[in-house]
Amino acid sequence: MLVKKNLSLYQVISYTWKVDISMLLFCTLVYLVDQYIFTKTMLPIAYPSLMGTAIAFFIGFNNNQAYGRWWEARIIWGALVNDSRSWARSLVAYSKDQIKAEKMIRRHIAFLYALSCSLRKDDTNTNYTTYLTTDELNSLNPNYHRANEILQLQAQDLNTLRQTGAINEFVFANLNSLLQSFCDGMGKSERINNTIYPITYVYFTQLFIWLFIALITMSTSSLIGISSIILGWLMGFVFNAIHFNGMSLMNPFNHNPAGIPISSITRSIEINLLQTLKSSNIPEPLGIINNEYIM
């Protein structure tokens, strides 16, 4: 997630320079075709004006949907932060078996790391193993959903606490509700992550932008001459930059600067839970990358 308040022109161009060059070449080609092939054709300026208005609404719709996905993902992980703190606080305060309570709190950190790795499809990250015992690691089936298996271990130990009288029925119901919330958060995150935004929206938006660039260049070439190339590129730059901004939010769990910083959120929860346990080995928060964003 971007944390820098302002973006420099250099940063914007660094994201869009490839399409900028393509648009300049395309506008040049359109200008030459208009000047030397369609010499007797003059395109009214009203055509690209109407198309530009339609594209603006279309891009606005796409960006609204993209931001909706991003914001929902942030709400889900915000709830995971609150529920995780409640989970640790309740186990420490109400469980008579503090050894098992600490084990379950540490296992919850493993669950969060396993979930974040699953959402980012990162099988190389093994941070979750730090908070699982050897027996627990051996019980995990590599072909199964790792985060869901960890929740299953949590449910078994929670039931053991109730059966042994380490917690009463009221506390059990509260902790079981939190366990269900963790499962809900996992499912909602996976729904966003696995639901592909219709490719037709992206394809036709890009197609219409390029058609608009061609029309604006052709309709102004007879009025401002070769400067129509720059005008066409400039209009295309504006639409493409806005469209790119929306597309960067479309998949909020992707490993990119605009995504939800689930690695940073997981580390923050890890720190909070270890502080609840009065642990002496507490990691530092994840830093800001390039003074621009957190992951």
Image: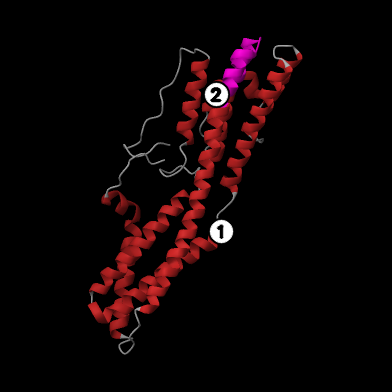
Q: Nearer the viewer, residue 292 or 171?
A: 171
What residue type is disc 2 on? Arg
Asked if residue 13 shows in the view, the reply is yes
Horizontal relation, residue 236 to residue 178: left or right: left
The quarter of the displayed image where residue 259 is located: top left
Residue drawn at x 60%, y 23% as measured from the top left: 87
What residue would you read off at disc 2?
Answer: 85
Magenta-highlighted residues: 84-107
What residue would you read off at disc 1?
Answer: 198
For the C terminus, give its image quadrant: top left
Q: Is residue 106 above or below residue 221?
A: above
**Is residue 200 on the magenta stretch?**
no
What residue type is disc 1 on? Pro
Asked if residue 142 shows in the view, the reply is no
- For the image, the number of numbered tags is 2
Instruction: Tell me how far mark 2 sits from mark 1, CA to CA.
Output: 37 Å
Horizontal relation, residue 72 to residue 24: left or right: right
Q: Nearer the viewer, mark 2 or mark 1?
A: 2
